[in-house]
Amino acid sequence: MARAMPNQLASLIRIAFFRMLDGYGISINPAMATRFKSVIAFLAAVAVVTTAACAGDPPAPTPNIDATIEAGIAATMVGVAIEKGVKASMAPSIAKEHLNGVIAYDVLGN
């Protein structure tokens, strides 16, 4: 086996080193490395712009919860008043018919 010259030996070592880094037996392409750096720089710029866009004015103030609760209670009270008015205006005969129907249903065992 012939001995390799020092320049050839350095070339072989360099080729073996790049193949070892890649892991697939293909040497690393310098253009691909430059493209990778460009992609990393682009993603960093996108992250900075996104962070700056999200750091704006504080959100709008929250609504007055006490007023919301009071309005809900008032609406419920209106509903109760309407229900009482309907019961008061209901004819007693209809109420008795309904009661008799309930009693008959209970007697039948259903």
Image: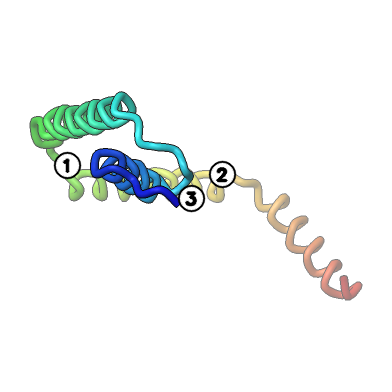
> In this figure, which residue is indicated by the disc labeled 2?
89
* Amino acid residing under circle 2: Ser
Can residue 19 be seen from the camera position used here?
Answer: yes
Q: Decide: marks 1, 3 in contact (CB < 8 A)? A: no
Disc marking residue 62: 1
Above or below residue 101? Residue 92 is above
- The residues tagged by marks 3 and 2 sit, at their Cα atoms, a distance apart of 9 Å
For the residues labelled 2 and 1, say whether their Cβ atoms are less than 8 Å apart. no
Q: Is residue 110 above or below residue 18?
A: below
Pinpoint residue 45: horizontal percent, then vertical percent: 17, 28
Query: Which circle's residue, 3 or 2, is located before the other in the chain?
Result: 3
Count residues near mark 2 (Cα–Cα under 10 Å), then give few for <14, some for 14-19, many for 20+. Answer: few
> Which amino acid, by three-letter code, is at mark 3?
Lys
C-alpha separation, residue under disc 1 versus residue under disc 3: 36 Å
Neighbor class of circle 3 (other Cα within 10 Å; few <14, some 14-19, many 20+) is: few
60 left or right of 84 in image: left
Q: Label 2: state its secondary structure.
A: helix
Task: Say above or below: 99 vs 8.
Answer: below
Q: Position of residue 39 (x, y in %)?
A: 27, 28
Give the residue pinned by disc 3.
84
- Name the quadrant containing residue 26: top left
Please tell me which of labels 1 and 3 falls first in the chain: 1
